[in-house]
């Protein structure tokens, strides 16, 4: 069970030295109890207390990093059941399955699809993050050969080695030494052999219930026994698969596991969940993935990559894993779109990420190099910022004066969003010598707006 603030306080040095950044040990203890601070902040805590508190203050879902280097992905570390309670921490990982029964050319095609899956959306790079190599052949030699092709073609991409055969697992994992892969397929029969391989190669273990392979029973009970067993063998980093394959079971099992971990601090189920969403029908596969994204899966394995499917999944994942308390925003400054000259147009908008990326994208599409002044309105969109009194004539005028743009441009014309046309007169009053032009209401009108200006010149 989680410790209360007072129980934690009893284990702290009680000197109120403030080195942790909190005024008293009690204040720090309260923050630890709410999992809003890390124990490392107190340099004077004893080893004995560290051990007791380490367990208690650890996130209920164990943080695990899959892969190494710049493509490594973090999983787990979740502390709430519902996103609006605080936030979800580590976005789920999408992995493409590659079966070892495929010909080398086909494996290469699939690996390329993973490499080329990356897109940029509102300033974030989104991609298929990992590859799940499936030992479909049941043959260790074939599995090793497929692993070799993938390791050569896709260095650095995190992998999940899927086999119940320890010999095949060891043959494949040698291709990914020190790259922190997952060996998925650990059951009560092979746990010891798999744990030894994981310790040798510093791998994560994927714990499976017997129902994952068509057996009966199992589920979360079997998983919790197995994770404890594997932990006693010296492996702490695990992901779990209860065998749930239907949407209803995925929601049920994932919710039970998350609830047990967070509400009861039940450690045997406090691990990231892996969900196998592969289906013949792409639309059904997408729907299963969506269930996983929304309900606690940390890894979702897919059978194929389709751009439309990726876009839907990426967008949903991005929305769910955005902190609801912090609007996505960009830095306040004057951005250059293309290579603007002193005569180039100057637009102004607010610093809500989506607004910035849509407006800058449309200016870019127009092929007219421009300046885009982005004003800090605490991440609010144009109309909301105006209604909240953050995008007013006085504030816009002050920002333009302080931004230094007057030294870069020859003209004195500011193009404001059509939605705040009402501000044009007031801005002209406050910005002496400036002319305010009302731009389009929607960003998609910018290319036509700029074209008609060019034609009129
Ligand atoms: S650093 Fe440690 S001893 Fe000092 S106030 Fe914080 S919790 Fe107390």
Image (cartoon, grey):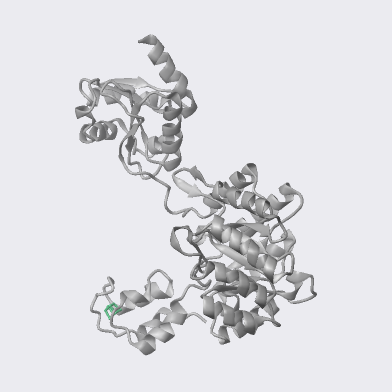
In percent of width and height, residue 118 lies at 52, 47
223 to the left or right of 154: right
What residue lies at 69% left-to-right and 78% top-to-bottom? 187
Q: Quadrant of residue 6?
A: bottom left
**Count of numbered circles on the image:** 0
In percent of width and height, residue 430 lies at 23, 26
Q: Say above or below: 52 vs 324.
A: below
Kindly tell me whether residue 224 is visible in this rendering.
yes
What residue lies at 59% left-to-right and 59% top-to-bottom? 150
Quadrant of the image where one finds ligand 1: bottom left
In percent of width and height, residue 155 lies at 51, 58
Quarter containing the C terminus? top left
Q: Say above or below: 103 vs 143.
A: above
Q: Say above or below: 444 vs 351.
A: above
269 to the left or right of 434: right
Q: Quadrant of residue 172?
A: bottom right
3 to the left or right of 215: left
């Amino acid at each position: 069970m989680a410790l209360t603030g007072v129980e934690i306080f009893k284990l702290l040095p009680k000197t109120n030295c403030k080195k942790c950044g909190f005024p008293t040990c009690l204040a720090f203890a309260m923050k630890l109890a709410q999992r809003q601070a890390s124990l490392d902040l107190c340099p004077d805590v004893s080893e004995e207390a560290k051990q007791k508190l380490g367990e208690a203050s650890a996130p209920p879902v164990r943080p695990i990093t899959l892969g190494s280097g710049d493509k490594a992905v973090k999983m787990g570390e979740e502390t709430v059941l519902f996103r609006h309670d605080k936030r979800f921490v580590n976005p789920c990982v999408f992995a493409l399955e590659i079966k070892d029964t495929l010909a080398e050319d086909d494996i290469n095609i699939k690996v390329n699809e993973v490499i080329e899956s990356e897109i940029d959306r509102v300033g974030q790079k989104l991609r298929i993050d990992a590859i799940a190599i499936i030992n479909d052949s049941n043959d260790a030699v074939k599995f090793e050969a497929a692993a070799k092709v993938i390791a050569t073609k896709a260095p650095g991409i995190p992998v999940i080695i899927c086999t119940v055969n320890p010999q095949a697992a060891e043959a494949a994992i040698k291709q990914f030494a020190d790259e922190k892969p997952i060996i998925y397929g650990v059951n009560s029969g092979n746990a010891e052999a798999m744990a030894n391989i994981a310790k040798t190669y510093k791998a994560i273990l994927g714990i499976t219930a017997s129902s994952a392979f068509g057996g009966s029973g199992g589920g979360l009970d079997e998983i919790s026994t197995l994770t404890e067993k594997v932990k006693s063998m010296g492996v702490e980093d695990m992901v779990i698969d209860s065998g749930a394959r239907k949407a209803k079971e995925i929601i049920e099992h994932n919710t039970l596991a998350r609830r047990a971990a967070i509400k009861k601090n039940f450690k045997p189920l406090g691990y990231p969940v892996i969900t196998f969403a592969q289906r013949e029908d792409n639309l059904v596969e997408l729907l299963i993935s969506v269930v996983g994204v929304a309900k606690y899966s940390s890894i979702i394995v897919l059978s194929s990559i389709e751009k439309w499917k990726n876009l839907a999944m990426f967008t949903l994942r991005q929305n769910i894993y955005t902190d609801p308390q912090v609007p996505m925003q960009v830095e306040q400054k004057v951005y250059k779109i293309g290579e603007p000259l002193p005569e180039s147009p100057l637009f102004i908008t607010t610093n809500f990420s989506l607004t910035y990326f849509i407006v800058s994208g449309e200016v870019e599409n127009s092929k007219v190099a421009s300046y885009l002044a982005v004003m800090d309105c605490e991440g609010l969109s144009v109309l909301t910022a105006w209604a909240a009194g953050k995008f007013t004539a006085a504030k816009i005028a002050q920002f333009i004066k302080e931004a230094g743009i007057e030294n870069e441009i020859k003209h004195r014309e500011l193009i404001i969003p059509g939605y705040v046309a009402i501000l044009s007169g007031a801005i002209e009053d406050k910005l002496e010598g400036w002319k305010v032009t009302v731009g389009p209401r929607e960003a998609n009108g910018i290319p036509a707006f700029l074209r008609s200006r060019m034609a009129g010149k």
